[in-house]
Amino acid sequence: MSAEELSVAVVGAGMAGRAHAYGYRQAGTVYDSVFPKIRLAAIADANVPLGEDAARRYGFETTYSDWRQVAEDPSIDAVSIVVGNALHREIAQGLLETGKHVLCEKPLAGNLEDARAMVELEREHGSRTDSAGRPLITATGYTVRRTPALNAIRERVENGEFGPVSNFIATYLADYSCDPRAPMSWRYKGAPGSGALGDLGSHVIDTGEFLNGPITAVRGAFMDTVHKERPLPVGNVVGHAHAEVSDEVEPVENEDFLTFTCTFANGAIGTYTISRVAFGSPNGQAYQVVGPRAQASWRIDKPAEFEYDDAQAGYQTRGPRRVLINPETPLFANSCAMDAPGNGWNYNENFVIQARAFLEQVVGRPSGLQPCASFADGLHTLEVIQAVADSAQQGGREVAITR
Ligand SMILES: NC(=O)c1ccc[n+]([C@@H]2O[C@H](COP(=O)([O-])OP(=O)(O)OC[C@H]3O[C@@H](n4cnc5c(N)ncnc54)[C@H](O)[C@@H]3O)[C@@H](O)[C@H]2O)c1
């Protein structure tokens, strides 16, 4: 890192890798200017044409075919890891050993053992500095918590307006695995808990804890798999996209759908329903926060608004009101080129705020944005995931979680 430039790279040019590339491209355009020039240095992907296409679209200078080339490039300061979860540990280790700041996608790792090793890496390298003498940052990417409307609901929870929160209801109903001919990919490999729970559940578990504080116990878990095997793709698979498949099949190792309940430190009960085989529901993420004095809800297909209901109005006009995010609600003012109320919001903008928060940590210039979650936070999510998997394996037994 030089005084004039901060160089960033993305490992993985798939579905979420592109969102990180977009985030870095935009990070210097939002909120107050605290950065040197952000240099879009490199995108690395084993699928070289995919990497080249992403680099061209998002204006990155170089394409690499292997993450090791990013590690070995002394000009690069900060890197996002956006590949299949089983690869996160090895890549994080290689990048930290060569002095890079690391933002790793959720879930932190493919299993608990890897996540614990990554927290060791965080401890070991957290006291080291980059070439400019700045402490190395290790972060886990939880993008949903960057949603302005969810931050507005969180403010209401923290103000005690729900009196207190009694129920938190989270659903994540996705349809990317409905088709039995959808190709085998890294998403279907790994122990119970690494399927819909790891992929989708990591988002909703983090959001639940973002709103209510830590989960202290889970219970009543049940998980199952609809499609027990999948055809192998003929070529590369990107994200949830369909691809040409062969006649050869491999077993699906993890769950398609699940449910569990939990308790939070604030006394709320959480009810979770998660599926990757939910017909007609491409990305149905929704939350409801309920208490004796207020109720709020948000859904990802209407990200720029939330519903809020309390006793503010008399019974003649009482009812849930639709609150559009605006410059008075958190995060929205100066978060995009045209921050006029009513202009809406898009999930991709969350990656901008996340990239922005991460780079603020890297340069040591906090502007009030919440710092990214640490690797230790990422491990905690995997401990909750493991507790859910254990509960399911033991007929729904309660499993306590300590942090
Ligand atoms: N924050 C979010 O909303 C969000 C959304 C989707 C995925 N994710 C996370 O992002 C990560 C990637 O998911 P995805 O859907 O983008 O996956 P993907 O399968 O679309 O892309 C992964 C890419 O990694 C590349 N790759 C594989 N091995 C590599 C290597 N050794 N070096 C460089 N590149 C390599 C593949 O060629 C592929 O293009 C996962 O951890 C996932 O959980 C997060």
Image: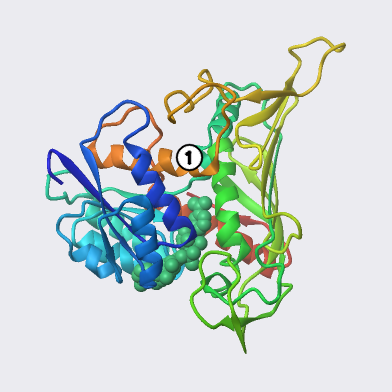
Q: Is residue 403 left or right of residue 28?
A: right
Residue that badge 1 annotates: 349
Which residue of the protein is positioned furthest toward the right in this rendering?
316
> Three-letter amino acid code at disc 1?
Glu
Viewer-closest of 331 and 197: 331
Residue 241, picture quadrant: bottom right
Residue 213 in view, yes or no: no
Disc 1 packing (10 Å; few <14; some 14–19; many ≥20) = many
Q: Residue at x 67, y 70 (%)?
A: 393
Q: Where does the image place residue 92, in percent across and percent down from the top left?
A: 31, 62
Q: Where does the image place residue 357, in percent across and percent down from the top left?
A: 36, 38
Q: Where does the image place residue 276, in percent across and percent down from the top left?
A: 67, 62
**Colour scheme of the picture:** rainbow
Which residue of the protein is positioned furthest toward the bottom in this rendering?
248
Q: Is residue 167 left or right of residue 192?
A: right
Vertical comparison of 328 with 265: above or below: above
Q: Residue at x 58, y 31 (%)?
A: 344
Q: Is residue 1 left or right of residue 27?
A: left
Q: Residue at x 12, y 45 (%)?
A: 132
Vertical comparison of 140 with 50: above or below: above
Assign a secondary structure to mark 1.
Answer: helix
- Ligand 1 lies in quarter: bottom left
Q: Is residue 73 left or right of residue 247?
A: left
Vertical comparison of 188 with 284: above or below: below
Q: Residue at x 44, y 31 (%)?
A: 336
Residue 118, picture quadrant: bottom left
Q: Where does the image place residue 297, in percent across and percent down from the top left?
A: 69, 34
Viewer-closest of 62 and 71: 62
Residue 152 in view, yes or no: yes
Viewer-closest of 343 and 179: 343
